[in-house]
Amino acid sequence: MEPTWSLDVKKIFFLNSAPSHLPGIEIWVINRDGSDLRQITPFGGSVMPDHSLRLSPDGKFLAFYGTGPEVTEYGTEIYVINVDGSGLKISSVQKVRMNGLIGEH
């Protein structure tokens, strides 16, 4: 599922299913030599990353298309998260709402 490299090319971030006891897709990271596989997100099915995981030019953030409870009416949206898995933000719906293109329901 479309991996993306860290800026120093030492780590690979990728989307994969959660452990078998949890629903959904999570963001994972692994060293390029195959060591230190870690799940970095705690979505647990609340947000479903779909595709296009990308690293920001400064290497601090990951962005991806996904769906969550606040965007099901609008379809797939753009999310941004810190590379450590913290600070999840939905980018596209917030900006459209700020511009008055989508009313609050």
Image: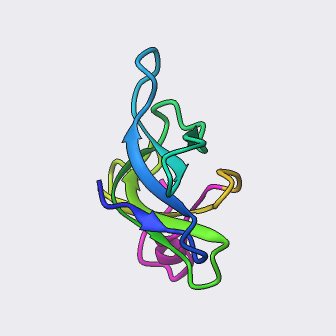
Q: Position of residue 58 (x, y in %)?
A: 65, 83
The colour mode here is rainbow
Q: Position of residue 59 (x, y in %)?
A: 63, 76
Q: Which residues are magenta?
A: 88-105
Q: Residue at x 31, y 61 (%)?
A: 2
Q: Residue furthest front?
A: 33
Q: Is residue 15 visible to us here?
A: yes
Q: Residue at x 64, y 60 (%)?
A: 83
Numbered label tally: 0
Q: Is residue 96 magenta?
A: yes
Q: Position of residue 66 (x, y in %)?
A: 38, 54
Q: Is residue 83 magenta?
A: no
73 to the left or right of 32:
left
Q: Residue at x 42, y 69 (%)?
A: 102
Q: Residue at x 40, y 18 (%)?
A: 20
Q: Quadrant of residue 24?
A: top left
Question: Residue 94 or 64: which is nearer the viewer?
Answer: 64
Q: Quadrant of residue 51?
A: bottom left
Question: Residue 60 or 63: which is nearer the viewer?
Answer: 60
Q: Residue furthest top?
A: 21
Q: Is residue 93 above or below residue 41?
A: below
Q: Is residue 93 visible to us here?
A: no
40 to the left or right of 48:
right
Question: Residue 97 or 39: which is nearer the viewer?
Answer: 39
Q: Quadrant of residue 84?
A: bottom right
Question: Residue 27 or 46: which is nearer the viewer?
Answer: 27
Q: Position of residue 55 (x, y in %)?
A: 52, 72
